Every structure is written in C-alpha cells, then in structure tokens.
Image (spheres, rainbow, N blue to C red):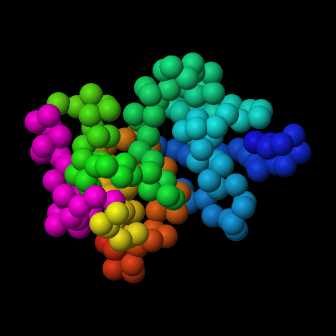
Amino acid sequence: KIYNHNSAALKNVKLRIQPKEFAAIVGSSGAGKTTLLKLLIREEDPTEGNIFLDGIEVTAIDRRYLHNIRRRIGTVFQDYKLLPGKTAQENIAFAMEAAGRQDAEIEEDVPQVLELVGLQDKTNNFPHQLSGGEKQRVAIARALINRPDVILADEPAANLDVRHQRELGE
C-alpha cells in the first residue's frame, strides 16, 4: 500500500494464516498494522497485490457485495466505532441485525456476549457513559456476536485493565 505516490505504508507483505491459528502482528507505531487491517477488510484497496479469504479474492469483489465477506469477519477497531446514539446492547444487536439475524436470536445472544465480556450491568449505557476499557469490551462483544470465521483486532487490549486483559485471553 502506497500513499501519495511515494509513501509506502506496506510493501512486499506475504501473510498466510491457517484455520484456527492465532496470529499477532506486532511492530512500532507507524509500521502499517492498522493499514494491514484496513486492507484485510477492504476498507482500503491495495496499491498492488491481492488479498484472499478462504480462497476468495477479496480485492476482486465488487464493493456492492463486500458485505458478504465482511459478515465472515469480526473486527475490533482501535477507536471502537461504536454508534453514539445506541446503548451497549443496541450496538451489539445492530451487528446481528445487519447480518439478518432474527429478533429471538438477538434477544438470546446479546445478553450472553455482554456477560462474556463482563458488561451485563452496562447493557443500557451509551458509549459516552462508558470508560475506554468498557467501550473496548463492547467492541470485542460486537466482533464476537455473529461467530465470525475470522476476528481481526487493532490493539484490542490497549484500553483494558490488567484483570480484563487476563479474562479476555490477552
């Protein structure tokens, strides 16, 4: 990925992650980790090269059909990307609604994932009423809720306290 015709964010990257494999991309600030994540979900297009998910060339998919691939990927963004006018529960439910899930399934699954990340008592809180770590846990819950094939996370534990890092497997 090259920006402004001469600023290479990433070059000569070859990455293959096998099913059920856990991989961490580490590097200093500005090394291109966030750019790589944006390329993998096709928020940005590579300047050259291809991206595949399960043998499907993501870079060849018409943008109108990207939602079919993105539904298979749970993403935890560094800046959370929570909807400010929705509660924690509604932010998570929205991901299920967008995937076409039924109301009964949403009503059953959302409380379970909120409990999983230790936020069952913050169900009706809006993002501005949550700490940074709580927002991060809502974002993690949202990434998990549709049981994606792949979870991509951009510094998912950056805002979590030590106790929650351990509980969530960091």
Residue 12 seen in this snapshot: no
Does the magenta run of residues contain 109? yes
Q: Residue at x 62, y 21 (%)?
A: 60
Q: Residue at x 84, y 49 (%)?
A: 7
Residue 35: horizontal and vertical position, in percent?
66, 49
Q: Residue at x 63, y 27 (%)?
A: 59
Does the magenta run of residues contain 37? no
Q: Quadrant of the N terminus?
A: top right
Given the current orientation, which residue lies at the most extreme bottom position?
162
Above or below: residue 51 compared with residue 35: above
Residue 42 seen in this snapshot: yes
- Viewer-side residue, 157 vs 93: 93
Above or below: residue 94 compared with residue 98: below
Q: Is residue 78 left or right of residue 98?
A: right
Residue 100: horizontal and vertical position, in percent?
27, 28
Residue 106: horizontal and vertical position, in percent?
17, 40
- Range covered by the magenta-colored residues: 103-127
- Quarter of image, res 80: bottom left
Q: Quadrant of the C terminus?
A: bottom left
- Viewer-side residue, 14 vs 99: 99
Q: Residue at x 32, y 67 (%)?
A: 130
Q: Is residue 70 left or right of residue 113?
A: right
Above or below: residue 10 compared with residue 96: below
The mark total stands at 0
Q: What's the magenta bit mostly, secondary-structure-wise? A: helix
Q: Is residue 20 left or right of residue 34?
A: left
- Quarter of image, res 140: bottom left
Residue 159: horizontal and vertical position, in percent?
45, 71
